[in-house]
Image (cartoon, rainbow, N blue to C red):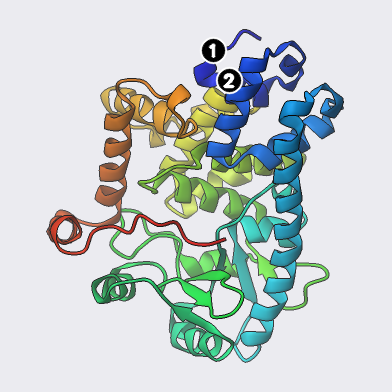
Amino acid sequence: MKSTSRDLLACTLRSPDAISRFSSSEWDILVRQARAAGLLARLAHHFHQHGLTATIPDVARWHFDAAKTLADKQRTAVCWELQQIRAALADLDGPLIVLKGAAYVAAGLPAAEGRLFNDIDILVPREYLPQAESSLMLAGWHATGLSEYDKRYYRRWMHEIPPMQHIQRETVIDVHHAILPDTARYHPDSAKLRSRAVAVEGLPGVHVLAAEDRILHSATHLFHDGELPHGLRDLTDLDLLLRDAAVDHDFWPRLAARAGELQLSRPLFYALRYLRYFLDTPIPAGMMAGLASAAPNRATLALMDGIFKRVLAPAHASCADAFTPAARLGAFIRAHWLRMPPQLLIPHLLHKAFVSPYPRAPKPA
């Protein structure tokens, strides 16, 4: 498959056999793009699956080997950390529901392969947030690195409490009571998500969302996030989740029905559209036709294409063009517009712009 340097990583994910024809400069660009996207370890697993490991030149192989070693270490650490969280929340009424990357690891899903982590996300009922926070604090987790304004903002408007970092291990937990803020335009019922949670074999007391809900949550998180440094990684999560779940021939109708039930048909539409564009994910034509009513009008869709085809690409100079900065700003504004009504959004953005700037440092792994 012919590719340009701009879409080299996406083309490699679609057609890994192409690496047998890569020049030294293409390997250099591929490593840089994959590192920026958080996909080095996943790409290494992808090559191994296709029997292509020997094709990687020595000068590039150590990058993939190092990333794979880190991913394997994090996977072991996540399993151990989940046991510590479960123990800390032993008195909490109900199961511990794990979200996103940690859930893929807990459930042994293909999406766990080569997945790197910044934090562990859990879901608890809103009424149990004070108890959960107190129990986690007693076990060594505390909110750190936030201004008093940010802490108030989290507790009043967000769908989670401020992130909590362990005082010794420095692991970070995000404790959610919902998957979108109360002020957002869409309001998926958290009780419905919890009601279908599935127990994890081998981790007593730990649950994950049902297959359809995992996909909808991943899509919702991706297309409501204003900063997408790892957007392509999150798309590969969705690709792997869909391919795994689609083994069940009843899956696609269930996914469409569940999206409608949870008011999440629009983010699902976007997810499937850009999965096709970047990764050629096999999606039934009838599924896209069924989601047509959730699509925006033509003008809005053209604008979204201009934004997402840029911001979902790796955050690397080789993937950018003259419009990429504007696209990233557009994604940032759109995400905040979806999360908060104007009377809350404008004062918040003014405060963040002139009083308490957005933090620049990433959360520790």
The residue at the far front in this view is: 59
Q: Quadrant of residue 95 in the image?
A: bottom right
Which quarter of the image is occupied by the C terminus? bottom right
Under circle 2, the secondary element is helix
> Relative to 337, is 105 above or below?
below
Amino acid type for the residue under numbered disc 2 = Leu
Within-10-Å neighbours for mark 1: few <14, some 14–19, many 20+ = few
Q: Position of residue 254 (x, y in %)?
A: 62, 46
Residue at 77%, 77% in the rendered image: 204
- The image position of residue 345, as x and y in percent, is 18, 57
Amino acid type at mark 1: Thr
Residue lying farthest to the top in this orientation = 2
Q: Are marks 2 and 1 in contact (CB under 8 Å)?
A: yes
- In the rendered image, which quarter is residue 238 located in? top right
Tell me the residue that label 2 is attached to: 8
- Work out whether residue 253 can be spotted: no
Indicate the position of residue 313 as horizontal and vertical percent values. 48, 30
Q: Please rate how many residues cluster around mark 2, counting C-alpha atoms within 10 Å: few if below 14, some from 14 to 19, many from 20.
A: many
Seen in the image, is 357 located left or right of residue 173?
A: left
Residue 10 position in % (x across, y down): 59, 25
Residue appearing at x 24%, y 49% in the figure: 337
- Count of marks overlaid on the render: 2
| Residue 130 visible | yes
Q: Nearer the viewer, residue 30 or 113?
A: 30
Question: In the visual, does 344 lie left or right of 218?
Answer: left
Tag 1, which secondary structure? loop
- Residue picked out by circle 1: 4
Left/right of residue 356 with respect to residue 11 in the rendered view: left
Report the residue at 46% width, 51% height from top: 221
